[in-house]
Structures are given as structure tokens and as C-alpha cells.
Image (tube, rainbow, N blue to C red):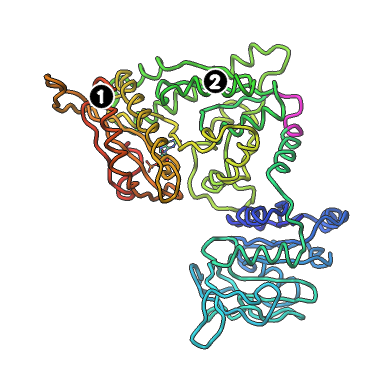
Amino acid sequence: KILILDFGSQLTQLIARRVREAHVYCEVQPCDVSDEWLRAYAQDGSLKGVILSGSHASVYEDSTDKAPQAVFALGLPVLGICYGMQTMAHQLGGKVESGRQREFGMAAVRARGHTALLADIADFTSPEGHGMLEVWMSHGDKVTELPPGFTLMASTDSCPIAGMADEKRRFYAVQFHPEVTHTVQGRALLERFVLGICGARPDWVMRDHIAEALVQIRQQVGVEQVILGLSGGVDSSVAAALIQRAIGAQLTCVFVDHGLLRLNEGDMVMDMFAGRLQARVIRVDASESFLSRLAGVSDPEAKRKIIGGLFIEVFKTEAAKLKANNAEHRGATFLAQGTIYPDVIESGGAKSKKAVTIKSHHNVGGLPEQLGLKLLEPLRDLFKDEVRELGLALGLPPEMVYRHPFPGPGLGVRILGEVKKEFADLLRQADAIFIEELHNFTDPATGKTWYQLTSQAFAVFLPVKSVGVMGDGRTYDYVVALRAVQTSDFMTADQAELPYALLKKVSSRIINEVRGINRVTYDISSKPPATIEWE
Ligand code: XMP
């Protein structure tokens, strides 16, 4: 295995992810583990190498963080990244200086010498004939003097020592970030380090992760009870399936139906979890409370607040009931959430003690404190595609694991203005037709369905009436807009160029099959300036 010592960078988990992508098992530990701990950790011989992460601090300014000195005495390869390189230089007798200017962004690095790490890798050749690498840099301080035994491995104009190596001891360090995708050869570099230089075996698979996660959940929960808010989305579903496998009947899922779900969603969730997985699921039909509180409200933010607030209320009531009815146990003491790693980074709550807050995320919000519950978040270290892989490995069907995301407020933000049951019913039918046809149409060039080719697709209800003709009669009915986007991160998105045949089929089916809709439009705005949802 590989050990990653975390100095508090937002990117530490990304290093872990790259190592896992090379199918090598790795663990992340805080940088301040003791020398004794480290020696004991390495004793059985399974540790093959250590990676020192970056930090957002600098060596001199506000950090006294160091790697345990024993790292350099284990006889194992060590790779320092960014701050990890600086602390390596500092601790081994080199010099680090505080840079007046931060260097941030892409840089071209000249790879020097023929170290095992950088030999024969280049993205392009400079006019002088040097092999050059395109890399991502983000640092203030830099190494200005190599420690004894080290040679120069890489340099840029502004950072003459951008990489260093002591090949005898198998110590390597780079100032840039190989873990981010902007560093073109980053993945190759990390693979070379863990597989080539460390000689770690590429035998880690999702199955192993499940086994470990099960042990961890059982240890954390003990004999206590857990509740989980099941939404039918990918993350909460995978979390539920995993926790259910670990602790079975100690888990109770609460599925709140706010009346703003997609067609048959509630039944599907129940079939899957209560039926196939035999989990304990309480289905709360709160649609009437939601719809009555939403009556007369048309402001989007006000609607979101009502839905979010009521959701917490309902959930709390159910949690309290569970406690009261659960005499033989002590009631639930854990709240499980499907928080995944990107949520953790976004809300600045990464395990690293020093990651900076970017924005707070609804998943990690105040609910647990209000309920007086401890948190159980078994997906915290995983990225979305890993969560999907885990879901499949746990036996969830692909159609559930590869579902498009669905917002918490549901159809509440897809019915413009005031939400009414009548509108929700029309929208549900129209949306189901759209999704069905996206599954039916395949793109000949890729062999994929248009559902697979879009990141998110749905129908939006517009409470405007327009005139139409049907048979001999005149109609005066509502409008539905179709939205389909392609995006990798949902921060920006392009409208999908759906084939006309698909759009025509959907339009004709909706108008013919959904009484009350007589016009269908396609939204061709990109994000920005539009957003993906209409409210
Ligand atoms: P926008 O509309 O901001 O949406 O471009 C970006 C992504 O976020 C989803 N979204 C939400 N998800 N609660 C959620 O859980 C919300 O309140 C919410 N609002 C938007 C949206 O569906 C899209 O995937």
C-alpha cells in the first residue's frame, strides 16, 4: 500500500484518487502522525512508499507542519508534491524561501536529467530542443537550494528548482501538481511513482473497498441505530445499500415524499429498498403538507425555503417517532448521509484540518446538530464515478446508479411560479415521456442512448396558456419546455444537440398523451448565462 500524508491541501484526496485509479491501495493520514506510529505502520512490510501532499500554507509563513522525520529513514520511496517538496527540502537540509509572488496556473516545465520519474516524458519540445511538460502550479514559496544528495529534476523560468530527486534514496519531489488533470502527464507520473518506483501491486479493486467500508461502518456504529434520509438519488441510495449490508436492521431509511417527485419515483424507491434489498424503509407521504404550504407562493427562493424547511421538520418528526417506538433499542443515534467527496471539498470540511471554506453545501448543513445525532458518511472519500461503481458492486441496478441528478426541491423548481398538484401531475407525465424517448433513441456515432449522452434532462412546466387545434376543436392549454444539457461539473453546461426526430417524437407524444398540454418548446440556452434549472 501507499501512505499519503496530508498537509491540508484541497487536492489531497485527488492524489488518493489517482493512486486508486492505478489500482493501488492507499491511505490518507494527517501529516502530524508520530515517528513511532509511522514505524509501526511500516513494520509488516506492506507499505511501499509515501507521498507528501501539498498544503495551502507555506513552510515559513504560517506553518510549522513537518513530515515525521522517520519518513526519510524507512528506506522507502518518498514523493513530495508542492508543500510536500518544500518540507522535504527543508527537513533534509535544503533551503526554502518565501516567494513574494504566488505562481498560479499553467506552466511549462523543463524536465532535466534522466530520473526514473521524468525520463522520456514530454508534452512538447522547446525551441532549444528540451523536453517540456505542461503542468499546473500553485505555490508561493519555493526551494532555492537543493538538499545534500539531491539533483535538479525540473525547472521553469520563475521556479528554477521545480523538481528534485535523490535517486539513491528514491526521494522525488515536484513543485507542480501531478494529481490535477491540467498536468497532462500527471497520471503517468503518479503511476510511475507508485507502480514503478515503489513497486506497489496494482491489485486494489472496489470489492476490497466494500469489505473495508463494511468493517469501518460496523466499528463506528457498534450496537447503535442509524437513520438515513433516502431520496432515490444516486448518493443516498448507494449509502443506504452499503450501510444496510453492514448493519442490516440497525438501519432505518426515511423516504419523504413531498409530492414533487418524478412519475412512479416513490414506488420505485420502495420496490428497490424495501423489496429487493429488504431494508427497513419508512415512506412518509407528506405531499399534502408540502402542497398546502406552497399554495399562493410563487417566488423561487421562498419556494425553496419552504420545501427545505418542511423537509427537515418532517424528517425530525419521523426521527422522534422512531425514538419513541423503539423501546428495546436506544433510538437512532446516527444520521447517515450520502455526502460524497466533492460535497466535502465544497463545504471546506475535508478531513484535512486546514482546507479553506469555499461554500457550504446543503448535505452537510445543520440537520445533525438539530437532531442531536452523530454523522455517518461512508461515501465521504469517494468521487461520483467511484460511488457509481460501488453502487453496481453492491448490486444496485445500472438504471439507478446512472440516473441523472434530481434537485432536492424536485418539481417545485420545475413548475414556474405557484406550485399546484394539477401542474405537478401534468409535468410528471410529460417528463416521463421525455425521459423514455431519451432512452429509446440511440446515437449511431457512439452507440449510446441520448439519456446516456446527456448529463441532465427534464421537462419544465410553464403556467402560460396558448391556443392550439386538435381534431376539429380549438384548445387553450399549458406549455412544457424540454431541457437537456451536457456538462462535466454542472457549473457550466451546454444545451444538448438532440436530434430533431427525437424532439418531434417527444413533442407529439406529450401533446397527444398529456391532456392539458398543447405546446412543447426546447430550451437552447447554455449555462451561463442561463442556469440548468429554470428556478
Ligand atoms: P443550476 O440550476 O444552478 O443547477 O444550474 C446546477 C445543478 O444543481 C442542481 N440543483 C439542486 N440540487 N438542491 C439540489 O439538491 C437544490 O436546491 C438544487 N438546485 C439546483 C440542478 O438540478 C443541477 O444538477
Q: Position of residue 373 (x, y in %)?
A: 63, 28
Say above or below: 67 vs 211. Answer: below
Would you say the beta carbon of the disc 2 residue lies within 8 angstroms of ligand 1? no
Q: Position of residue 398 (x, y in %)?
A: 55, 35
Structural distance between the alpha carbons of marks 2 and 1: 31 Å
Amino acid type for the residue under numbered disc 2: Met
Amino acid type for the residue under numbered disc 1: Asn
Q: Residues within 10 Å of mark 2 (few under 14, many from 20)?
A: many
Q: Would residue 229 be counted in the magenta stretch?
A: no
- The answer to whether mark 2 and mark 1 are in CB contact below 8 A is no
Residue in the image at 55% along x and 27% along y: 230
Q: Secondary structure at mark 1?
A: helix
Q: Position of residue 146 (x, y in %)?
A: 69, 80
Q: Where is mark 2, residue-wise? A: 270
Q: Would residue 220 be counted in the magenta stretch?
A: yes
Q: Quadrant of the C terminus?
A: top left
